Image: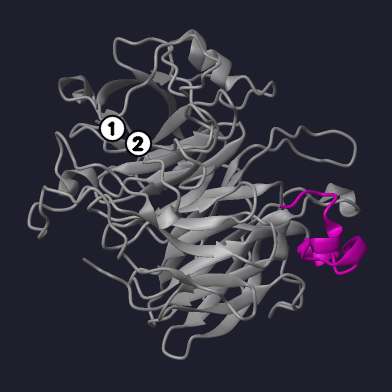
Amino acid sequence: MHSRRHFLKQSGFLAAGFMGLQSLSRAQAFGLGTGESMTTQLPMLRRDVYGPLVPDPDRVFDLPQGFRYEILARQGDRMDDGLYVPGKPDGMAAFATDDGRIGLICNHELSDGDDESGPFGRRNHLLQSRHRPYVYDYGKGDQPQLGGTTTLILNPKTGQKELQYLSLAGTDRNCAGGPTPWGSWITCEETNLKAFGKIEKDHGYNFEVPLSTRIQPVRPVALEAMGRFRHEAVAVDPRTGIVYQTEDMGDGLIYRFIPKVNGKLQLGGQLQALAILDEPSCDTRNWKSLSSPTFPNDTPFSVRWIDIEDVTSPDDNLRFQGFEKGAARFARGEGMWYGQGEVFFACTNGGPIEKGQVFRYTPSTFEGTDRETEAPGKLELFIESTDKDVLKNCDNLTVAPWGDLFICEDSESPCNLVGITPDGACFEFGSNRYNDSELAGVCFDPSGRFLFLNIQTSGLTLAITGPWQQT
């Protein structure tokens, strides 16, 4: 009998699902409250989640019957601050504003050579000296780093965009990140770029971007205590304020950052790396080429956390320090999201066919305290793809307000938006018909009405609405 989280190999995508749960109920599996109305017996397959995709006559994005998308932002359009919408939109999050609108903060995975799609236009002709306090790496006025974030304000009653502006500038390859419980976005640099020539500063840091409903760019401050490495995404536990982090390397670590003061990341804290208790230097990747034992599905492992020192090392060696101390290896940590009492994260090329894994971490009741060893946090391999027609190279992901998991693909065309329901059914929710681009930035607004998504190399941001099955 297959593990419940090994995908079944079937000829059609919608024939794919999960076997029934074994030792955990679905409510436990997705961290839902015990009061949720859910059974513990699953059908072997479900094909009726949202139904088949309907071809989009405009050949942008296929969705199930009853769903529609609107293009909110497009690379190259002028924003309200006079700059251009940057290209390569990546991770993002949506926030409720005090006046009932939605604020969407979006990463742009650009570098200094991307001026054709940067916010300052071709050859950075819109860059002015007045921008300098708001540009982290000004590139001596000639070659600024072009990664950063934009903020978009949406009126949910009309569905119309009301404001868009550049909210963070001068960073490099802002890939993903994560929202905070206090209403800001942590944007992550996926780079180990060092200062030289016209590059004025080292990169590889996180930056915090508060939400503002008026044009208010951030004066960038690198959150150095959170570590210098190839960051991908973060998730913040609202109970403790601890920040979990992925590293996009083939032998990356999973980190956590315990701030000195909850909600004040700029005041510093302790960076740590995840290790499996009693399994030093555990390898979770499950590649066929490895001689290490297979990391099993359906088995929660107790973890311990290892202190990482010299966190701003210029040598991109924090993971090697972690290995020496017994930290676990992961296959390109990508998207990460806090659900309901647990953290999900994707490893884009983990598993025997190297098409992706999704892990679930459940923090300790005493997470980050001296009593943590009394009840350690648990790590579980939640999903491992054994068929690329079901899931291929999972990247950004999010947890819907009702518990569904939505996963972006970053692989060969077409790249799909894949869903997993709380009762274990796998379904294809959307498909990119515009080009071969990866999907990115999937997130819901707090009400659960809007799902936002990026088609990265097209520079498109979509808002999707429809008859969500909030069961």
- The crowd level at tag 2 (other Cα within 10 Å; few <14, some 14-19, many 20+) is some
Residue at 65% in and 69% down: 460
Quarter of the C terminus within the rendering:
bottom left
Quick check: 337 above or below 454? above
Amino acid carrying mark 1 in the image: His
Quick check: 351 above or below 68? above
- For residue 332, side relative to residue 449 (left or right): right
Give the distance between the C-alpha atoms of the residues marked 2 and 1, in whole angstroms. 7 Å
Circles 2 and 1, Cβ within 8 Å, touching? The answer is yes
**Nearer-the-camera pick, 462 or 191:** 462
Range of residues picked out in magenta = 110-131
The reply to whether residue 91 is in sight is: no
The reply to whether residue 233 is in sight is: yes
Q: Quadrant of residue 204?
A: top right
Q: Which residue is mark 1?
A: 2
Does the magenta run of residues contain 113? yes
- For residue 11, side relative to residue 58 (left or right): left
| Residue located farthest toward the front when viewing the structure as drawn | 11
Percent across and percent down for residue 241 are: 33, 44
Report the disc number at residue 6. Answer: 2
Quarter of the N terminus within the rendering:
top left
Quick check: 174 above or below 287? below
SS for dot 1: loop
Percent across and percent down for residue 246 are: 49, 36
Percent across and percent down for residue 96 are: 39, 72
